Image (spheres, grey):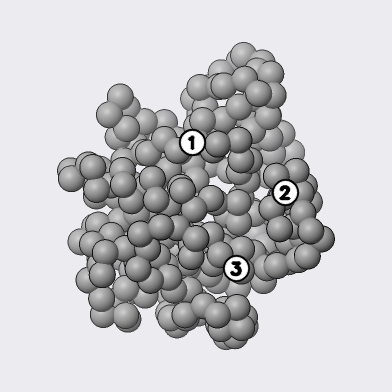
C-alpha cells in the first residue's frame, strides 16, 4: 500500500461535542454531516489506496458505515487525532509508504491539498511529516483576528523557514503585523490546514512521547514532533480561489455554510 488516509473522529470534543455529526448545508440546500464531507474529500484525492474512519464512539461508527466508510474502532485513551491515527494503523496491521491524517473538522479541504501534501513529503526525504499551509488574504486574516478579539479559538497559524521547515504553530496570529490588508490582498500570515502526511516510523514514535509543554499550552498536536526534534515540512498549497475554514466552534457553522454556497459546493 502506498497511501493510507485515516480520518480521526471523536464525539467528546470539549469545545463542540458531537462535531463530526453536525449537518452542514451546501449550495443546493442539502445537508450532509461534517464527517460525510470529510470522507468525500478524502475519497476524491488521486493516488490514495485506502480511506478509513477511526473513532471510539458507536454513534460515529454507525453513521460512518451508513455513508459507506470503512471504520476502525480505537480506544478512548487517544489524546488527539495523531494518536488515534497511529492506533488505527496498528490495528489495521498495514505498512503504507505514507499515512495521511485528514482531520474531520475541515470540510472545505480540497482533494488537491492531499495530493500536493503527499507529493511534497515524497520530495523531501529528510522530513518526518508534512502539513499544508495556505497564505491568508486580508479576509482570512481578519477572520482570525475577529475570533481572537471575541475570545474564540479559531484557526491555527504557522511560521516556517526558507526550506519550508516548520518553526512554530500557534492558535495566536503569528507573525505579528500591524498592517491593515484589503480582503483580497496577500498577507505574511499562513493558515495551517488540519492535514498531515506522516512517515510510518515517525507516526509510531509519536504515540510513545509524553505531551510537552508547548503542545499542552497551545493544544496543538503537531508541536510534539517539533519538541522531539523531528522535521516538519510546511507545504504551501494553492487555494485556487477556494475559501478554507475549520469547524472549531458552533459559530463556525453559518460561516462554513456561507462559504459552501458562495463556492457552489453541494
Q: Is residue 57 visible?
A: no
- In terms of image quadrants, where is residue 50? bottom left
- Helix, strand or loop at disc 1? loop
- Nearest to viewer (mark 2 / mark 1): 2
Looking at the image, which is closer to me, 189 or 221?
A: 189
How far is mark 3 from mark 1, CA to CA?
A: 24 Å
Where is mark 3, residue-wise? 35
- In terms of image quadrants, where is residue 89? bottom left
Left or right of residue 132: residue 203 = left
Answer few, some or many: residues within 10 Å of disc 2's Cα (few below 14, many 20 plus, some between 14 and 19): few
Left or right of residue 212: residue 112 = right
- Helix, strand or loop at disc 2? loop
Where is mark 2, residue-wise? 264
> Which quadrant is the N terminus positioned in?
bottom left
- Nearest to viewer (mark 2 / mark 3): 2
> Which quadrant is the C terminus positioned in?
bottom right
When the figure is inspected, residue 33 is found, relative to residue 193, above or below; the finding is below
Left or right of residue 41: residue 29 = right
Which is more N-terminal, label 3 or label 2? 3
Q: Residue at x 52, y 27 (%)?
A: 189
Which mark, residue 238?
A: 1
Q: Residue at x 79, y 58 (%)?
A: 28
Q: Is residue 8 visible?
A: yes
How far is mark 2 from mark 3, CA to CA?
A: 19 Å
Amino acid at each position: 500500500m502506498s497511501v493510507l488516509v485515516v480520518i480521526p473522529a471523536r464525539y467528546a470534543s470539549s469545545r463542540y461535542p458531537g462535531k463530526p455529526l453536525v449537518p452542514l448545508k451546501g449550495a443546493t440546500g442539502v445537508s450532509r454531516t461534517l464527517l460525510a464531507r470529510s470522507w468525500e474529500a478524502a475519497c476524491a484525492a488521486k493516488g490514495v489506496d485506502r480511506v478509513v474512519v477511526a473513532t471510539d464512539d458507536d454513534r460515529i461508527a454507525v453513521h460512518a458505515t451508513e455513508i459507506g466508510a470503512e471504520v476502525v474502532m480505537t480506544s478512548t485513551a487517544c489524546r488527539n487525532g495523531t494518536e488515534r491515527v497511529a492506533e488505527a494503523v496498528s490495528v489495521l496491521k498495514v505498512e503504507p509508504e505514507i499515512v495521511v491524517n485528514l482531520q474531520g473538522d475541515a470540510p472545505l479541504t480540497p482533494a488537491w491539498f492531499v495530493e500536493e501534501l503527499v507529493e511534497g513529503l515524497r520530495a523531501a526525504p529528510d522530513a518526518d511529516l508534512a502539513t499544508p499551509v495556505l497564505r491568508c488574504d486580508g479576509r482570512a486574516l481578519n477572520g482570525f483576528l475577529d475570533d481572537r478579539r471575541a475570545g474564540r479559538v479559531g484557526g491555527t497559524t504557522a511560521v516556517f523557514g526558507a526550506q519550508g521547515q516548520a518553526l512554530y504553530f500557534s492558535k495566536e496570529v503569528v507573525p505579528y503585523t500591524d498592517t491593515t490588508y484589503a480582503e483580497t490582498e496577500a498577507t505574511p500570515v499562513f493558515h495551517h490546514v488540519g492535514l498531515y502526511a506522516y512517515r510510518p516510523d515517525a507516526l509510531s514514535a509519536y504515540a510513545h512521547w509524553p505531551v510537552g509543554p508547548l503542545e499542552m499550552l497551545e493544544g496543538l498536536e503537531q508541536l510534539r514532533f517539533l519538541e522531539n526534534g523531528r522535521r516538519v515540512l510546511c507545504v504551501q498549497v494553492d487555494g485556487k480561489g477556494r475559501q478554507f475554514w475549520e469547524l472549531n466552534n458552533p459559530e463556525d457553522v453559518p460561516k462554513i455554510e456561507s462559504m459552501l454556497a458562495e463556492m457552489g459546493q453541494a
